[in-house]
Image: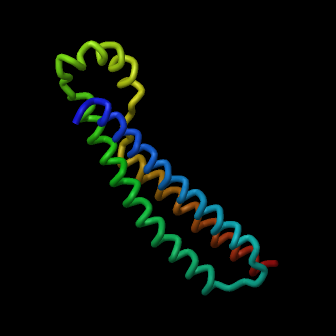
Amino acid sequence: MVYAELIKLYFERSSALQGYWTLYVVIIGGLLAFSSLRKQPDLTTTSLVGLLFLCFAYKNLGAIQDTTHNRAAVLQTIKQYAPTSAESAALSTLRPALEPTLMSTDSSSVRNFHMFCDFLTIAALMAMELRRRRG
């Protein structure tokens, strides 16, 4: 695998990661919109929707973590790449400019942020259910 292919793979993994986060945000937005439009209190529906969201969030977090690990492995390979003599001249200017901008994300911080957002989403669902019961 040549340097250009590694860079392409890094950005493909970054795009996949962005797709998983976008899907996560869209699901949360739809879930909260659905919950805010309901008029009648129904703890069963709220509980079921919350449980389904947690199942989705669990699988989404797994996909995000896997992709984060993939991207970190590609980044490590990029940094350890030894260019051939034909590539050396071209990479001598590209590497110092490009590689500092390629970042790896800590898997535990990704997990903590995702779980915090999961908790806030479930809390919002429950708060909307309580509001319906009081109103």
Residue positioned 38% across, 46% down in the render: 13
Looking at the rendering, which quadrant does residue 38 occupy? bottom right
Looking at the rendering, which quadrant does residue 46 occupy? bottom right
Residue nearest the observer in this picture, 64 or 97 = 97
Position above or below: 87 against 53: above
Instruction: State the quadrant of the N terminus.
Output: top left
Residue nearest the observer in this picture, 106 or 85 = 85
Residue positioned 72% across, 83% down in the render: 41
Position above or below: 121 against 135: above
Position above or below: 98 against 72: above
Residue positioned 31% across, 48% down in the render: 69
Where residue 67 appears, x then y in whole percent? Answer: 36, 51
How is the structure coloured here? rainbow
Where residue 124 appears, x then y in whole percent? Answer: 64, 66
Where residue 35 appears, x then y in whole percent? Answer: 69, 73
Where residue 10 appears, x then y in whole percent? Answer: 36, 39
Residue positioned 39% across, 33% down in the render: 103
Say whether residue 7 is left or right of residue 85: right
Residue nearest the observer in this picture, 131 or 94 = 94
Position above or below: 131 against 82: below
